[in-house]
Amino acid sequence: MKNNNKIAIVSASLGIGGAERFAGLLSLMLQDLGYEVHHIIILDHVDYEYKGTLVNLGKLFANEKGVFRALKKGKYIAKYLSENEIQTVIDNRSRPVFIREVFTKWIYGNRKTYFMIHSYNLEMYFSKFSLGAGYLYKEAAKLVCVSKDIENRIQAKYNLDNTTTIHNPVAFPETTYQLPNLIPKNYILFFGRFEEEIKNFTLMLNSFKLSKVYSKGTMLLLIGDGSDKDWIQAKIKELQLESFVLVLPFQKNITAFVQNAKSTILTSHFEGFPMSIVESLAAGTPVISVDCESGPQEIIRNNHNGLLVPNYNEAALAQAISNMVFDEDLHQTCKNNAQKSVEHLSLTNIAKQWEHLLAQN
């Protein structure tokens, strides 16, 4: 295979988060397009399906500690890229530390490098040293943003014009799955990272309590893992919702839970192009989401495939939850339109955009 058909995808891991889920889907698309894919992951966490060769630095350097561990990982990546004659890199990591990214710039060298931007919170991808953005990214092949709002913000804030937008893809379920035993029949679902600073579980739980849908048998199901799991459990207890909110750990196959939900819900302070929303719609399940920056507004048509409400408004969100549960005509309309509304985000369609991008330069 020609060297220019080799691509390395560098990610934090292949587990739990939406960006990591994207990395797995990207490998499926690229391999099907004829590329030889090499996954380089920093942490030993693999849950999602992927194609290609896996380089698990978390496992390779499990016994190393501190700063020397990071340096050794960096040198290993540089050597691996060179020995395997890989000339194209897609960097899928969060990149907030300027000094570390200077080292990364040396590792990648003159290779054609694409940097993914998965969040409207640009501090996750650009250091606070704003002048450093030009140094790190001006010569990149492209900064690939997952929403148009993110691209516009980067252009305005950093004066970078080597940007483009390619939305996250979604895989459509090929079958209908049955729920595991002991899962309630009627529930609204959240799945993702348990991180209050991003996902705003305070708003979600307060609004769920205010909606009172639990009094008629609809529960809230939370599935995931993260640093705030204990805090969330304490908040549920504080609101006296222990009998109405069920918390489960991360599930490798989330599809059954999504397909059987009344709706999924998202209450984030900010996003990028949230995978949970498009995965829900692809499974035929409507969504309730706050209109955070960015992503939901580019996916949800209010009262068509879901409900979009102003962010930080507990009363409006509670009403949306109630409407989705009790207004059967509204729910059925959103359900009927769900899958069709995200057909443009299929692996086939998004793969064509990546194929076009990689053929440039």
Image (tube, rainbow, N blue to C red):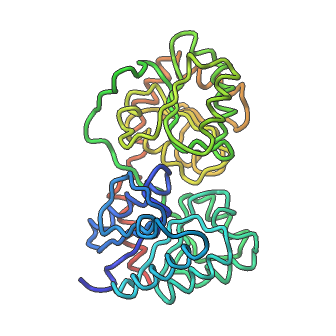
In which quadrant is the N terminus drawn?
bottom left
Viewer-closest of 153 and 112? 112
Left or right of residue 218, residue 137 in this image: right
* Residue drawn at (42%, 30%) of the image: 335
Q: Give the percent coordinates (x, y) of residue 184.
A: 43, 19
Viewer-closest of 160 and 55? 55
Q: In the rendered view, tell whether residue 41 sits above or below residue 269.
A: below
Viewer-closest of 349 and 1? 1
Q: In the rendered view, tell whether residue 313 sits above or below residue 86.
A: above
Left or right of residue 1, residue 147 in this image: right
In which quadrant is the C terminus drawn?
bottom left
Q: Is residue 198 visible?
A: yes
Q: Give the percent coordinates (x, y) of residue 301.
A: 54, 39
Q: Residue furthest top?
A: 216
Q: Give the percent coordinates (x, y) of residue 306.
A: 52, 33
* Residue drawn at (37%, 52%) of the image: 48
Left or right of residue 186, residue 160 in this image: right
* Residue drawn at (61%, 68%) of the image: 95
Image quadrant in which you'd find residue 179 = top left
Q: Give the percent coordinates (x, y) of residue 192.
A: 52, 43
Viewer-closest of 100 and 326? 100
